[in-house]
Amino acid sequence: MVCQQLSFIAMMELTRVKDDKGEIQAPKPKKRRVVLFLGYLGSGYQGMQRNRGAKTIEGELMRGLVKTGCVPDHLQDDYAKLKWSRSARTDKGVSAAGQVVSANLKCEVDGELSQNLLDQINQSMPKNITIRSNFPSVLHPKL
């Protein structure tokens, strides 16, 4: 029991990060594959799939993820590095009750976004787009 406690304490010391002043910082969220289940009203949008210069659902979703820190600024246009995938596309003006998107995102909790972070993302997006839930990636959106 004592050995387990000591090894746990040693492991905690190794994972602590100190800043320039020597103060311990909170651990940074890790990137994890996350599946987002969302719905949206498509009127006023040029469809689901991102398209430069057009107002799209993916564009709004990406802005919300960048605003909340789930996606770093420098990766917001690099969908390949995020391993971004969607279950389907919709055309201009088409709504979806259930759309699935997965990507490598910075998460607070192991493989999931906390409810607080999910609420922040939803608040940063237009009211007609809502992430309903999220879960660790155990499936591919297209399957």
Image: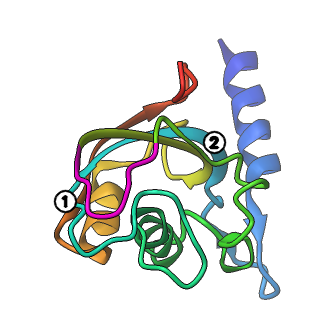
- Magenta residues? 89-96
- Give the prevailing secondary structure in the magenta stretch: loop
25 is higher (above) or lower (below) than 30: below
Mark 1 is surrounded, within 10 Å at the Cα level, by few (under 14), some (14 to 19) or many (20 or more) other residues, namely some
Which amino acid type is shown beneath numbered disc 2?
Arg
Which amino acid type is shown beneath numbered disc 1?
Leu
Label whose residue precedes the other's in the sequence (2 or 1): 2
The x and y percentages for residue 49 are 51, 58
Report the Cα–Cα distance between label 2 and label 1.
28 Å
Q: Is residue 65 left or right of residue 52?
A: left
Identify the residue at horizontal 38%, vertical 50% (top origin): 90
The x and y percentages for residue 12 are 71, 44
The x and y percentages for residue 111 are 54, 36
Mark 2 or mark 1, which is nearer to you? Answer: 1
Q: Is residue 133 left or right of residue 84?
A: left
42 is higher (above) or lower (below) than 110: below
92 in the magenta segment: yes
Residue named by callout 1: 41
Which numbered disc covers residue 58? none
- Residues at badges 2 and 1 in contact (C-beta under 8 Å)? no
Foreground pick, 19 / 57: 57
Which numbered disc covers residue 32? 2
* Residue 138, quarter of picture: top right
49 in the magenta segment: no
Furthest-front residue in this view: 92
83 is higher (above) or lower (below) than 19: above
Identify the residue at horizontal 53%, vertical 18% (top origin): 143
Q: Is residue 71 left or right of residue 88?
A: right
Element under disc 1: loop
Mark 2 is surrounded, within 10 Å at the Cα level, by few (under 14), some (14 to 19) or many (20 or more) other residues, namely many
Identify the residue at horizontal 43%, vertical 65% (top origin): 61
The x and y percentages for residue 58 are 47, 62
